[in-house]
Amino acid sequence: MTTSSTIDYSAPDAQPVRGNWFRRAEGWLDDRGKGAWIAAMVLGFIFVWPVGLALLAYMIWSKRMFTGTCASKRTHTSTLRTTMRSSGNAAFDAYKAETLRRLEDEQHSFEEFLKRLREAKDKAEFDQFMEDRAARTESGAATSADRDGDDTRA
């Protein structure tokens, strides 16, 4: 029994890429990003216009035209999968879990610190606004009182 498969050695898991030629071509173009999809579409329009039109329709339908790089989604999900996968060594897995928990706690603490910093800055700006407003009100009242006093003398 023979199956057509290739191995992508740049992938973190180095798993065989199985499937029909369309899936392999799609994966190849995704690995190279949106520019590869656009280049394939333009070449399709130049050499055989229905192929270019079909690629354009597929890019719009699959939302590849309107997202970031095509490879970014694949890289993020494979990194997440690799991070959560067990190594088979219980001591290392415990160390990794503890390190990830500690990093998450530090990130949470840092986000709380930034929130308090923003709130303090907002309060300082608001207090400054209120002081400026009070000073303008006092100077405005003094100016209008002077004008009112000048009118009564004349």
Image (tube, grey):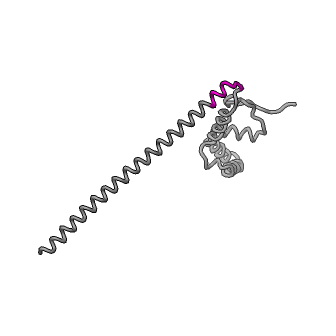
Q: Is residue 22 on the magenta stretch?
A: no
* Magenta-highlighted residues: 88-97
Q: Residue furthest right?
A: 1
Asked whether, in this view, residue 141 is left or right of residue 129, the answer is left
Q: Is residue 79 visible in this depiction of the protein?
A: yes
Of 123 and 40, the residue lying toward us: 123
Residue 28 place in picture, x, y as percent: 69, 37
Q: Is residue 93 on the magenta stretch?
A: yes
Q: Residue furthest left?
A: 154
Of 8 and 91, the residue lying toward us: 91
Q: Residue at x 37, y 51 (%)?
A: 125
Asked whether, in this view, residue 70 is left or right of residue 140, the answer is right
Q: Residue 146 is drawn in which quadrant? A: bottom left
- Image vertical order of residue 33 relative to residue 154, above or below: above
Of 40 and 131, the residue lying toward us: 131
- The rendered magenta stretch, by its main secondary structure, is classed as helix
Q: Residue at x 69, y 48 (%)?
A: 55
Q: Residue 151 is drawn in which quadrant? A: bottom left
Q: Quadrant of the N terminus?
A: top right
Residue 140 place in picture, x, y as percent: 25, 64
Q: Residue at x 64, y 47 (%)?
A: 64
Asked whether, in this view, residue 115 is left or right of residue 51, the answer is left
